Amino acid sequence: MTPPAGRERCFRLVALGDSITVGVGDTVGPDAAHGPGWAAHLAAVLGAEAFTNLATNGSRSRDVAGPQLEAALTLRPHLATVLVGGNDVLRSDFDARLTLMDLRRCVSELTGAGTDVVLVLLPVIGLFELGPRLVRRVMRRRVASINAAVQEVAASAHGLATDGPAAQPVSGDEPTPISRHGRVVVVDATRAIAPAVAKAWHVDRVHPSPAGHRQLALAATTALADMDPEYAPPPVRGSDQEWVRALAARLPEAPDPPSVRQRLGWLVRAGLPWCVRRGRDFLPGLLRAVVHDLRAERVLAPGSMVTSLADSGLDPRRRIRRG
């Protein structure tokens, strides 16, 4: 059994999630060993022997905790990345408690199989930051509720983690988990991609840009190395800034950001059609959530026609219960 920091750094990494983990917003050339996306870049920086990206566009937490988790467990990975919730917050039936349950299942089963897990906090969705104040507030609360679920699951996992004996090797070429119970590390996507500044976001303002994907991979690498020095890839870690620059040199080259003409072209070809398709499902739920915000602040009179549209099942103020 060769640990991640062993001579050949032989271990398997799997990625679960949605379009961000698929790599939407990223662009790579032939020098990208594992393809596009932050998780693929993480595999390259860590020197993973094998990388499998199970993420699919449009996936919600139930998809990650269902088919993706099942496939991940069969691969017996040493390390898994989980980024969920981005599509859940865009749906009219959004319920953070369901995402919490799905996250619990993912982390529990992965760590129980000996897999270390990287959980990622969602960034605020930039597209909705361009909207009215009430829309911004609702979307921020939805994202915050997902992130509260991530933090709660991570805290629970830390309480359950043990330093058990190493798992025994199995026959064949399949890798085995590093330990009896995996560990969990949390990465804040907003802070991670901040160094890219204006180049952090794709033109859709929903997904990270090529620079953003690479910054997220570097942040995950640093978080893993802080958790366990065995995850720290060479060179030997000196000052953090010098070390991160050395790791960044391993990443596939990022292209220049698109021009204004290219951004406008994307908006006409893909952006507006996407908004129309997603709006049919999302806008009714968003309206109900906004109405709940207004009701909670007593801005609308009780019994008005607008307040009658509210659906308590979508209240963004609902607290996530423990247990």
Image: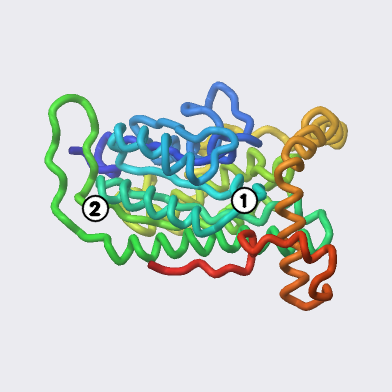
Does 6 sit above or below residue 129? above
On-image quarter of the N terminus: top left
Q: Residue at x 59, y 58 (%)?
A: 191
Which of the two discs, 1 and 2, sits closer to the camera? 1
Q: Secondary structure at mark 1?
A: loop
C-alpha span from label 1 to label 2: 34 Å
Residue 245 visible somewhere in the drawing: no
Would you name the residue on which mark 1 appears? 93
Question: Element at badge 2?
Answer: loop
Q: Residue at x 48, y 39 (%)?
A: 63
Of 203 and 7, which appears nearest the observer?
203
Dot 1 amino acid type? Asp
Q: Which residue is mark 2?
A: 181
On the rendered structure, is 153 left or right of 87? left
Looking at this view, name the residue that lies furthest to the front.
303
Q: Position of residue 120 (x, y in %)?
A: 50, 52
Label 1 close to label 2 by CB (< 8 Å):
no
Q: Position of residue 168 (x, y in %)?
A: 12, 41
Report the number of discs: 2
Q: Amino acid at mark 2?
A: His
